[in-house]
Amino acid sequence: MDPRVAIIEERLKSIKKIIAVAAGKGGVGKSTVATGLALVLSEMGHNVGLFDLDFYGPSTHVILGASEEIQPTEERGIVPPKVHGIEFMSLVFYTGKNPAPLRGPDLTNALIELLAITRWGELDFLIVDMPPGLGDTTLDAIRLLKNPNFLVVTTPSRIAYETVSKLVALLSELGIPILGVIENMRRPSDRARASFGVRVLGELPFDEGLEDALGDPGRFLQTEFAQRLHEIALAIIQRSRGLT
Amino acid sequence: MHEWALAESVVATVKRVAHEKKLHRITEITVKVGELQQIEREIFEFALEQMLSQADSPMRDAKVVLEVERAQFCCRVCGTRWAFETQQLSPEIAEAIHFIPELAHTYIRCPQCHSPDFEVVQGRGVWLASLKGEE
């Protein structure tokens, strides 16, 4: 019997709300939305954690500007370091610039290990940057995280809608709460698309200034992207109160 | 210490199993640890004993048997089998694998064909091998 699973619930006890930011697809700006949401909620005065579960392509540390010197501390497990006021955990602390070529069972074991040994503080929100797709880590997160609420990110592209609709269908079938959909990278010329039957929380513009603000949270929070995300965050707070 | 976190998970599992099997007294707990986990045996045993002595009465006097299983790999590409050798790793890499044993795939390669695509045949994880007690 694997004892690690038994302790996960205890490890997540100090977290009021877990928000899994998912897309079912790569390239829609999911990590930017997840990190931005963590920064915006933290700026509002909430205690926030950010957990990067994209083991193949972790990138939230780049957006957050976490320097290589920042590391978790050991204290009866591992305590996530605070980066710009956010408790932050990522596999990248242990892989650095090296790839993590993991097969399915290894992904599951790595996630269980991280969940079993990470000691989060008292958090109002834990934002989870989910991997693309509906594979092992997504299914494990649904199984192991304490009642996660999903926030689904898409772009106006038909390609993104096609894939993301499958994620929404799966979550709906499993009865997992969906906070809503965010349409990212919207340009004024983009056509309106049919909804998934899930509430659209808002649109985020294709922001030319965003790339230069990556790694600099102060500047990031000044972007139009972050300001629009602030409005969406208020809607999320309102909506998350209504979902269990 | 990472060992404390794992010891805590073992004690939580013992508690759950004892409850399910309606055991009123637990006499012996056998825990197996994979070598890849690179656990400091003394710290892990100390942590287990400390936590058990503070836990509910059914497990307070339980004897702890700790067994370490050697780690072995088998390459999925060329079929080579080899054993885990900590002495070949830098302290930073050994520590990364200690925390997340799957990172063996990041830092270890097949000695024959250099592939990262290998199976950990044995010696990974921590598990409760057996529990003896009285109903």
Image: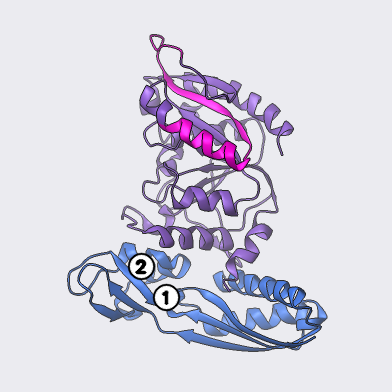
Chain colours: A purple, B blue
Q: Which mark is residue B104?
A: 2
Amino acid bearing label 1: Leu
Label 2 close to label 1 by CB (< 8 Å): yes
Residues marked 2 and 1, same chain = yes
Residue A60, given in percent of the width and then of the height, sits at 44, 41
Q: Quadrant of residue A150?
A: top right
Image quadrant for the C terminus of chain B?
bottom right
Q: CA distance from mark 2 to mark 1?
A: 8 Å
Task: Count up the numbered dots.
Answer: 2
Element marked by disc 2: helix
* Relative to B65, residue A182 above or below: above
Task: Report the chain holding disc 1.
Answer: B
Q: Residue furthest top?
A: A189
- Left of B118 or right of it: where is A86? right
Which residue lies at the image location 37% right of the left edge and 72% below the top edge?
B120
Q: Quadrant of residue A131?
A: top left
* Residue A223 showing in the rendered view: no
**Which is more toward the observer, B131 or A4?**
B131
Q: Is residue A151 magenta?
A: no
Give the mark nearest the N terminus, 2 or 1.
Answer: 1
Which residue lies at the image location 53% right of the left edge and 75% below the top edge?
B126
The crowding category of the residue bearing disc 2, from other C-alpha atoms within 10 Å (few below 14, some 14 to 19, many at least 20), is many
Q: Is residue A177 magenta?
A: yes
Q: Which mark is residue A20?
A: none
Task: Report the chain holding disc 2.
Answer: B
**Which is more toward the observer, A168 or B125?**
A168
Amino acid bearing label 2: Ala
* Residue A23 showing in the rendered view: yes
Which residue lies at the image location 43% right of the left edge and 68% below the top edge?
B101
Provide the residue designation for mark 1.
B36
- The residue range painted magenta reads A163-192
Residue B1, given in percent of the width and then of the height, sits at 57, 70
